[in-house]
Amino acid sequence: MIAELGHYALVLALSVALVQATVPLYGAWRGMAGWVGLARPAAIVQCLLVMIAFGALTYAYVTSDFSVLNVASNSHSAKPMLYKISGVWGNHEGSLLLWLLILVLFGGAVALFGGNLPAPFRARVLAVQAMIAVGFTSFVLFTSNPFVRLLPAPMDGRGLNPLLQDPGLAFHPPFLYLGYVGFSMAFSFAVAALIEGRVDAAWARWVRPWTLAAWCFLTMGIGLGSWWAYYELGWGGWWFWDPVENASFMPWLAGTALLHSAIVVEKRDSLKNWTVLLAILTFSLSLLGTFLVRSGVLTSVHAFATDPARGVFILAFLIAVIAGSLTLYAIRAPAMKGGGLFAPVSREGGLVLNNLLLSTACATVLLGTLYPLFLDAVTGEKITVGPPFFNMTFGPLMVPVFLAMAVGPMLPWKRGDLLGAVQRLKFAVSAAVIGVLITLVLAYDGPWLAIPGIGLGVWMIAASLEEGAYRLRLFRAPIGESLRRLGRSTRSAWGTTFAHAGAGMVIIGIVASSAWQVEKLQVMHPGESQAVGPYQFKFEGAVPLDGPNYAAVRGTFRVSRDGREVAVMQPESRSYQNPPMETTEAAIRTGWGGDLYAVVGDPTGDGAWSTRFYNKPMIHWIWIGSLMMVLGGLISLTDRRFRVGAPARPGGAARAAGAAASMAGK
Amino acid sequence: MTRKRRRLYIVGGFMLIFATAAALVLMAFEENIVFFYSPTELARKMEQQPIPPDRRLRIGGLVEEGSVSRDKDGITILFRVTDTVEVVPVRFRGLLPDLFREGQGIVAEGSMAMDGSFVATEVLAKHDETYMPKEVADALKEAGQWQGDHE
């Protein structure tokens, strides 16, 4: 009964979305207030209906209702409650319903909190949002219905893939989707602006918080995903340039570029065309990511099912969205004139450079991801484009981004002085030099590329801090004045400081952990020891034990350094029954200097076990840095000018009036 | 600074970055594309011209029943990969993935040794008991040995 209710709510949601996608749009065009006014309640009703549908599916999972096919195939009564709930989105149908839920939640948020948007504009935004919802609701209803019944109901379910039974992964999809789908707001705002033929500072001020929020979620989602890969897969790696990872990374790169170009639109009324295009491309990449992962063209842990009808549907939808929005862009964009002029060396210039580099880097990732698919489809030849390709193309393109990232915030708008900016960063310059020298002393035998890599990371962190200090006139003015400045300074500038320093930490983590990692692989009898860098791992033996829904073998290692015990590590090798599957649970001990990582493998006969150890210096900086970036985004999000009611279109400004006149004329 | 001038700078900068990226991509494609071969294709290639040991490639097929053993050092694992027509002996030093077992489809990445065996640096056996890597399924179809039902 509950499942049917969910299904029915979803059908109703589709009809509401159809109305919301058309009526307000027509109303805004004809200037009919009643029709325009429909957008808001429609968005809220649609949101409630999808919430009911999602709630119904969750209910079926929580109560282990195995008469629902989706629950029977993906859940099991013996599963802990957390994984019963996360099982809702741990499968194809449920994850699409989550996608849809987040989409309508964003729509509902605009309806509820978008009171400061002009009514026709809001109606258009919500109509575009509803068009996407129509596509996805029909996709769920017609190709991936999660409410299909299974009769007779089985006694128990088939269970969730044990790799997915993990707290990190329970929250990875919702964050990722909040990011992916969050970019739909930027898309809807961009398309609505194209329909209106007007992009101005107020537009950028509306778009930026949504983009920023989506970006924070996506950063968090990618971070959680890589952390999960690191500790759950037992390979010691955290990023594999796997097509599925790239699928989430491309929207992130484009979204990062969008965040920065929107600043130029807001502050300087420039780069409008480009920003609108970027908003369209970012969401298109999100859709492409969904297509790659959900259509089954890629085989991976994420591709839950391979059904050609689904792939064709998403591909058709993808083409419709991209072709439709780009056509609209081609018609409308030339009419939008760019505003403020600027010299190449200026804040705007820095942001343009950031955009060019990020979008080119994104394009190389896209190429490396799609080329094997393309080649397979055209010639049948099977190739892989692995990490070396991405390291060689993506890496060098990001170096100037990181170099410039530190200088950009020091440059004034319009026209800057590069030499002066670098001179003001003298602390950061010396910190980077000292960082390089210390690294040289500690790691005199290379690898050589790692040394400037560390310098780059130190440069970014130090320059971000110095830029913050400069803003406060710290150490150059009485402390009282610095504190006063702290109280008055804008939050978004602090967001920049945090996020840029976080990026620097990520760089240091990546460089150090890949350059100076020690890996040891051996067969050990109980009682034997193995040296890993400065550490000694003593194998105490391995014993069987029982978990709630698995059986495991647990190895015990005593780790010492200079004769002092620093840790006891207990990695496990688990076998799950439902579904039957083995997983490796690495033991990880995080210290100040980095991680120790231990894996127990198979018994080799004669009482010995194969074991693997890693010492990964500074690897935790990758995730601390990612969290700093998210924190920076959140701080920026609390900036006053993004708060509800703050951004208002400058009605008296000549440009806005001109645009309004041109709009009234059509 | 006029509008035209600014556009010139931006376009110029873009061309420069784009050209660099294109050069990097071409170079990386030259060196880092890894081809996939089934045991049959591999045998055919080796007949024409031996693959040099510095060339990375991927092979895939089923782990032959009864072929898995450990080398004297205890850590190197020896097994054979087959598409039921040809067989490739594989050496792998490392921990096998959780789902590695005889009769299971796997993909291995590595290079050819001088003695005609394959030295794997990575072995992938993915995800669940019914899952077959796509390349392996295609390779088996090619060999006319496909009876699977997951089309």
Image (cartoon, coloured by chain):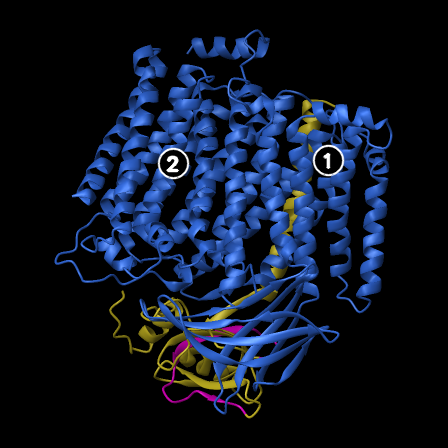
Chain colours: A blue, B yellow
Can residue A168 be seen here? Answer: yes
Q: At x 33% / y 26%, what residue is drawn? A: A44
> Count the marks: how many?
2
SS of the residue under disc 1: helix
Outermost residue, top side: A652
Residue A562: image location, x then y, percent = 75, 74
- Residue segment shown in magenta: B52-71
- Front label number (1 vs 2): 2
Instruction: List x then y, in percent, for residue A284.
Output: 45, 40
Q: Nearer the viewer, residue A646 or A480?
A: A480
Q: Secondary structure at mark 2?
A: helix
Q: Which residue position is annotated with label 2?
A: A103
Q: Which label belongs to residue A111?
A: none
Instruction: Determine if the magenta segment contains residue B56.
Output: yes
Q: Is residue A422 above or below residue A107?
A: below
At horizontal 35% and vertical 43% (from top left) the residue drawn is: A98
